[in-house]
Each structure stands twice: as C-alpha cells, then as structure tokens.
Image (spheres, helix red, strand yellow):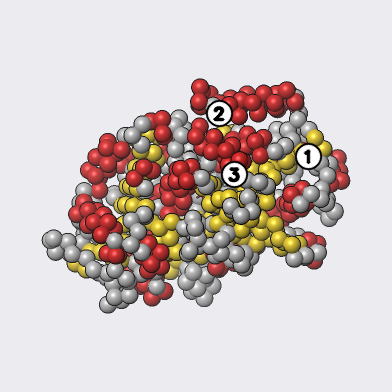
C-alpha cells in the first residue's frame, strides 16, 4: 500500500504506511498520537513518509478535493494554486497565545492564557473535529539532519495543504523518525482547520510542555507549525533555557574573490528579507567576483562555537514561504527561479493560460484573470488581483543561489548581524553600532512601518524588537537579557548594523534603489567586519562617508548620499520618544542595560 488510508474502528488502531517506518519506537510518541486521535476522531490516518511518490499522491488527492488547482504544467511543472478561505490570509496575532502557568513567564508583549484553561478550551474545539476527515501524521526535523541544534516535531493535522507544505518547508517523513530514535524529546503539534471561523481561532503555545495547539486557521504562519510556532516561539524559549538563540533572521553568504563572509539580518515581516537573502549583485560587482548565496530567508538558530568563541548559525527550514507581490525578474530573479517548478502558490491570480500573476510581476496587468478568490478580474476592477500577502512555498533546492553549506549540520560562522526597518524618514541608510551591547539596544528599539503580512492597519511605525515582537515565546524582558548575556559567551562577537532601504524624499519617492544595489552597503558592512573600511563616529553609531560607499554607476551624488545618511537630531528626539512605547510596555522590568544605553544615546545628541 503506497499510502496509509486506514479506516478506523474503535478502539482506534493505526499502522504506518508500507513505506513509512513505525512511529511507535517510543511509547511516548504512540501514546500522544493515540490521545490526539481519540480526541479528534478522524475517519482515517495517513502517516507521512516524505517520499516523492507520496507527495504526488497527496497533490492528486488535493486536486480532486479542490484544495489545489493544477497550473500550466509546461510553464510551471509541479506547480499548483491554493485559494484560502478569504477570512484566513495572514497571521492573526490577536488569536496567538503563550500559555504558561504564570503571566510573568509570558510577559507584556504576548497574549497569555493559563495552560489548563487553554487545554480545556481547545479540547472543546478539537473534540470530534476530524470526524469524516483524514488525520495526517507529519514527523519533521527543523535544522540540517545531525545538527546539534536540530529539533524533531510531529504535527497532526486535518489539512492536506499543510501536509504538502510541511513536506516543502521541513525535512519531513521517515528521516524524522530516524532522527528521533527512541528519544522522547519532540514538539507536539496538533492542528485542525476546524470550520475556519475567526471567532474560534486559537494558536496556543505551551513552551513548558514543548507543545503547540492550533485551531481554526489554515494560513501558513498559523498552520505550518514548524515555522513561526516551533522554530521561533518554542525555539526562542528553548534557546533561552539552553544558551542559544532562535531569531527571525535571514542568513546569507557574501563572497568576493574566494573569501566568504556570512551575515544574518532581521527585518520585520514583509520588509524584503527574502529579496535580501537572494540578492543578485549588479553586473559590475558580478564581474568583480561578487556573489551572494542563501542559507535561509526567514529564521536563524545561532549558538556559540566553544572552540572558536564565535557565533554559528543554521537555517532550521528546508524551503521558502515567501511573499509574492512585487517579485519579478528584476527585483528577485532567484525567487522567480524558485517558483518556476514544484511550488505551491497561495492566493495569487490565475491567468487564462494556467499560469499565475500578481501585482508587480509584469509592468502591465493582464487583460483578464481570476483574482485570488477565483472571481473574474480586469485591471479596472479597483481591487488587487493577488492578495497582498499571497505566498509561494518552494523547496530551497530550487534556489540557484543556494549556499553549499545550507544543509551543513555545523552551520556557518556569522560575522555581522544586520537590523533593518521600513522607515520613510528619520533613520539613515546604514550605521554600525558601537559594540554588541549598543547593537542589542539598536535591535531592541527597531521600528518599522506595518505591512500586510500580519493583518491590521498598514503604514504605522510599530516597535518590533529584533523583528521578533510576534515571535518571542516568553517574556521580552528575559529575551533582551538573554541577548545582552550572549556577549559573555563570545570571544569575538559579530558586528551589529542597522539599515533602512526605505527612506523617502520630500516627494515621497524612495531615494535608495535597493534590491541588488544593496550589495554596495553590504560591501561596507563586510569590510567593516574584516577591518578594512573607514567610518566616522556619530551620535547613532559608526557611519560611512559618501566616499566610503561605492556609488559608481548609480544616479546618486555624494550630496544625495549625505542626505540619505542625514540624521536630524530634533527629529531623532521624536524617535527616542517613540521608543518609549516599548520601554513603557516593559515598565519596571526594563533591563538595566537598556536604560544605560538609552542614557548614553541621549547624552550623545
Ligand atoms: C513570515 C512573516 O511569513 O514573518 O515570514 O510573517
Ligand atoms: Mn518571517
């Protein structure tokens, strides 16, 4: 039998598929699955093996159920479109909870629920929710197999869309049973789309139980539980307990003439992390031997190598779940290559020839298509054809610029950490923090104008410490203290930088070209890390002079560059007041290092 579709009789008996290995190596795993099966009462169970045959068969079933629409297989082999419920298109932070016995463990920036109350409430929702449905048992590994940080999770879900996407985003299937062996250490992930009612939507994390229960949403960030829920919220908690870090960061390698430097960068959701991770340097740089390679585009797990005292990182994911609108051959050719095959598109528009379209894909909109909800659309309609948070899910192996170390269990050494926000005014294009402690302050006070990735109002500055505000799985006070304390573990720590690609002039136009040209800023960053570039001391930190950045070939004069770097101290005072929003949230719990850094900043103005 290729796939386990076992009709359950009471008591529930489930066996693995012929090509799956038995999950029952550990009685703890079996007991937990039994408990969840008894609770959810699925009609049948499918244990995912992770094979290619299985993937094909799951997609075929999904097509029969209308979950996947086959795209033009000549233009996009192995690609399918999924249309979500229109009420379920983004992460829902108001429905996301950290469930710890004491609210103090959860902290002021998360929604809190008492664990017994949360289990009780969600049990009521999960009870019988899979009647008439199949439960997919998805064993998965986050991190390269054999990595000291790799973690096993098991997700039980009634969504075939989730099963297929987890197969792209994680190392999924038999490999995970092998990695788990007879260990009892795995993240228990229970998920049901339920009836997809926003009033019955809960994404609950139980860090002390290494458990995630998610009900009522099929959206990636709420439903692919290995990603935001495990690799950030649960992992950040584990990292704090165990002395490592789980961060909302891309990791990329920048090589020039055989010397490679790895950087990690944290930008809030939908601020171009995928573009930056897949950056293609302009021709002049390529000719001079520059190349940027991708380790990851969203999440970094980092630890200090005891032998070298330096920070190392892995990407726990195996695929990309990227925002599609705005992506084209100019802005991100590597992402375009990623989605050329074996990709699941969610909520993009469907063209008459079976290809897909989104705003920004081509200069001209198509004469007609079906919009993300499947409704006829023409350019005059006044609505978006693709949802602004439409996504592609593609395996990282599709990326032509995949770094050869992306699957290395030992990870890569990180030389720079870059924080960045989307700020029309106030913040310069680039500066370097004076040291790690100052850099932590710069990251902690990161602000960015909101986008469509998280639902809610768009375009207001939101404080987003380390771009982790929605993803810190415990008290932000302890998270910041953890960052400060990491310094002591390192003998040579990464240099920390802040960038703002999104500064606008008085006419409201972006003044920095961004995308591939960002390599010019990376060049300065890397040269600083390697002790090669000049910088001047300013109240904010170390800044390049116009002459320290290669502007050749850009339509930007040295005085334009100075304008991009200009910090108006009066306006900056307002920025400091804006940072108070965060300080007030932490109130009496603000780590003393934050207070000292703020005092030093004020004294420099
Ligand atoms: C994402 C996000 O989906 O940050 O990566 O929202
Ligand atoms: Mn993200």
User: Which residue is label 2 attached to?
Assistant: 591
Which quarter of the figure has residue 398? bottom right
**Residue 380 is at least partly visible in this image:** no
Q: Residue 235 at what x, y percent from top left? A: 46, 48
Q: Earlier in the sequence, mark 3 or mark 2?
A: 3
Instruction: Give the spatial CA distance, label 3 vs label 2.
Output: 19 Å
Residue bearing mark 1 = 543
Tag 1–tag 3 contact (CB < 8 Å): no
Is 312 situated above or below 119?
Answer: below
Image point 49% across, 58% down: which residue?
148
Residue where numbered disc 3 is placed = 489
Disc 1 on helix, strand or loop? Answer: strand
Instruction: Look at the image and tell me in which quarter the C terminus lies.
Output: top right
Crowding near the residue tagged with mark 1, few <14, some 14–19, many ≥20 C-alpha atoms within 10 Å: many
Left-right relation of 337 to 60: right
Nearer-the-camera pick, 443 or 198 = 443
Q: Nearer the viewer, residue 95 or 307?
A: 307
Where, quadrant-wise, is the N terminus in this rendering? Answer: bottom left
Q: Nearer the viewer, mark 1 or mark 3?
A: 3
Above/below status of 577 relative to 8: above
Instruction: Say which label, 1 or 2, has the lower sequence index.
Output: 1
Which residue corresponds to the image point at 68% horizontal and 51% vertical from the top-left? 415
Q: Position of residue 511 (x, y in %)?
A: 75, 43
Residue at left offset 36%, top offset 47%: 210
Circles 1 and 2 in contact, beta carbons < 8 Å: no
- The image quarter in which residue 464 lies: top right
């Amino acid at each position: 039998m290729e796939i386990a579709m076992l009709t359950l009789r009471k008591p529930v008996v489930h066996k693995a598929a012929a090509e799956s290995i038995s999950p029952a190596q550990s009685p703890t795993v079996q007991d937990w699955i039994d408990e969840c099966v008894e609770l959810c009462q699925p009609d049948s169970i499918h244990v995912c093996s992770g094979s290619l045959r299985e993937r094909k068969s799951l997609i075929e079933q999904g097509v029969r159920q209308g979950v996947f629409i086959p795209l033009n297989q000549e233009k996009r082999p192995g690609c399918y479109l999924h249309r979500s419920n229109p009420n379920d298109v983004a992460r829902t932070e108001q429905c996301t909870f950290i469930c710890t016995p004491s609210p103090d463990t959860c902290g002021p920036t998360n929604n809190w629920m008492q664990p017994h109350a949360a289990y009780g409430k969600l049990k009521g929702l999960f009870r019988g929710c899979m009647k008439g449905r199949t439960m997919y048992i998805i064993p998965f590994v986050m991190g390269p197999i054999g990595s000291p940080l790799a973690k096993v999770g098991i997700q039980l879900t009634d969504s075939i869309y989730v099963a297929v996407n987890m197969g792209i985003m994680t190392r999924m299937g038999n490999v995970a049973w092998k990695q788990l062996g007879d260990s009892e250490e795995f993240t228990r992930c229970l998920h049901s789309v339920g009836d997809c009612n926003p009033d019955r939507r809960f994404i609950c994390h139980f860090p002390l139980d290494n458990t995630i229960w998610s009900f009522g949403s099929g959206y990636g960030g709420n439903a692919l539980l290995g990603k935001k829920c495990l690799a950030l919220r649960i992992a950040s908690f584990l990292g704090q307990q165990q002395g490592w870090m789980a961060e909302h960061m891309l990791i990329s390698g920048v090589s020039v003439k055989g010397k490679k430097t790895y950087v990690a960068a944290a930008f809030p959701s939908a601020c171009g992390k995928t573009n930056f991770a897949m950056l293609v340097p302009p021709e002049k740089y390529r000719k001079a031997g520059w190349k940027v390679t991708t380790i990851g585009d969203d999440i970094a797990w980092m630890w200090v190598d005891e032998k070298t005292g330096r920070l190392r990182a892995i990407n726990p994911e195996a695929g990309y779940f990227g925002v599609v609108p705005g992506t084209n051959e100019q802005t991100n050719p590597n992402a375009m290559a990623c989605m050329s095959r074996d990709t699941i598109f969610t909520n993009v528009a469907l063209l008459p020839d079976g290809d897909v379209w989104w705003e920004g894909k081509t200069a001209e909109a198509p004469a007609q298509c079906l919009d993300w909800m499947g409704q006829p659309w023409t350019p005059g309609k006044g609505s978006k054809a693709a949802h602004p948070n439409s996504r592609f899910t593609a395996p990282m192996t599709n990326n032509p610029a995949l770094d050869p170390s992306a699957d290395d269990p030992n990870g890569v050494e990180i030389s720079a950490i870059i924080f960045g926000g989307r700020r029309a005014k106030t913040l310069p294009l680039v500066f370097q923090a004076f040291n790690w402690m100052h850099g932590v302050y710069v990251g902690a006070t990161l602000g960015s104008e909101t986008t469509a990735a998280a639902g809610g109002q768009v375009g207001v500055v939101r404080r987003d410490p380390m771009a982790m505000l929605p993803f810190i799985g415990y008290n932000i006070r302890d998270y910041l203290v953890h960052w400060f304390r990491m310094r002591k573990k390192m003998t040579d720590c990464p240099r920390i930088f802040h960038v703002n690609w999104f500064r606008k002039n008085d006419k409201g136009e972006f003044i920095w070209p961004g995308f591939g040209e960002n390599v010019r800023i990376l060049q300065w960053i890397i040269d600083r890390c390697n002790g090669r570039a000049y910088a001047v001391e300013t109240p904010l930190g170390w800044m390049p002079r116009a002459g320290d950045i290669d502007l050749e070939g850009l339509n930007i004069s040295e005085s334009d560059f100075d304008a991009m770097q200009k910090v108006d101290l009066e306006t900056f005072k307002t920025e400091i007041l804006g940072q108070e929003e965060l300080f007030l949230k932490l109130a009496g719990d603000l780590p003393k290092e934050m207070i000292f850094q703020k005092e030093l900043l004020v004294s420099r103005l």
